[in-house]
Amino acid sequence: MLPYFSVVDLARKMVGDLLENAGHGPHETAWDRIESSAYRLRRYGQIAETKSPVLIVPAPIKRAYIFDLLPQVSVVQRLRSAGFAVYLYEWPEEQDAKWGLEACISSLCLATEMIATKHGAPPILVGHSLGGTLAAITAALEAQQIRKVVLIESPLKFGEQTGALRPIVFASPVLPLDTIPGTLLNLASIAADPKEFAFDRYGDACACLADQEALAIHLAVFRWSLDEFAPNAQLIQDVLQLLYREDRFARNELHLLGRSAQCDLLGNVAAIVDHTSRVVPSSSALGCLKAPSVFSYEPEIGVALQHVGPIVGRRAHEKVWPNVIDWMRAHL
């Protein structure tokens, strides 16, 4: 069965390439790469030695360019226009078989240390979904190296608060694989919440037919959703066991790199939350935070998947991000 998933991954990539050739791919901001044996980052533009650096941490299951999809809904461009030095973490596509939760947190810690040294000030971490979870864990371990954290639809409290993914997560077997096919993750998401990951997507396409700008964003997100990323199996197994099933981060029982990552010690945290979401319920996003600044995202058309709506939604960029950026700038 597993070779089947690899074939479907290839087919999905081919469809994505066709969409891109038809003009529905990303229109990205110019960037250069910073690479070491421990991490790989995109750095946008000729960044001056500003003391306001930001490191964006995408989810480790899809390509990072969702944060810079189209100019009118680019988080990267919005942050650059606000005066921040912007870096985007790129998850490695070829990973050691033992690349698990501890290895990826170590990589993020080293990346934040480099940025802090270069700019003479700790960065703000901005993370989406599981990327936000990993950013929060990094901040809990490296409080002196992180200035603030912005979490976008990021689960922190699991167990009973897991939401729609809970039945799939708790039923998932241990797979003897080096990487997890993207198609397998996609099917698991659809099985967990067919409304969010299937039916609503087609409904959104229909709603966009009379709105060309919304349709352009929808098609670009759809193209991105076909750009498979096969995450390391050890990382997925660690996330399922240590976070989802045992809820160690929220319980302040997560030990990595010889230290304790305690969720309730996180400070200076802002959370962008969709209070209607079944994928990341607000109880999961906010349940173990003390006095976070909460910014509400309201579902809108043109985003294909509401889970990425806070990143690519027009109304999110008009109503939510200006307030988030004001919060990011405060007391810098």
Image: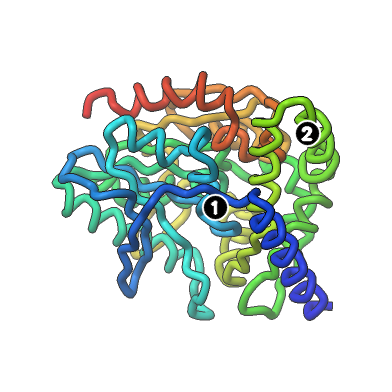
The x, y position of residue 248, in whole percent, is 53, 52
> Which sits in the foreground, 234 or 318?
318
**Residue 44, image x and y in percent?**
33, 50
Give the residue at x 49% y 64%.
101
Residue occupying the point 44% across, 64% down? 104
Instruction: Let me know if residue 325 appears in the view.
Output: yes
Q: How is the image coloured?
A: rainbow
Q: Secondary structure at mark 2?
A: helix
- Classify residue 306 by image quadrant: top right
Expressed as whole percent of the image width and height from the top left, the position of residue 209 reads 79, 31
In which quadrant will I find the C terminus? top left
The residue located at (73%, 35%) in the rendering is 278
Residue under label 1, please give it. 59
Front-most of residues 329 and 241: 329
Residue 26 appears at what percent x and percent y? 56, 50
- The vertical placement of 130 against 320, above or below, is below
Instruction: Please name the amino acid that badge 2 sits on.
Output: Asp
State which tag comes first along the sequence, 2 or 1: 1
Q: How many marks?
A: 2
User: Which residue is labeled 2 in the image?
Assistant: 204
Marks 2 and 1, how far apart at CA: 23 Å
With respect to residue 317, does 160 lie above or below? below
Tell me the amino acid under the disc marked 1.
Ala
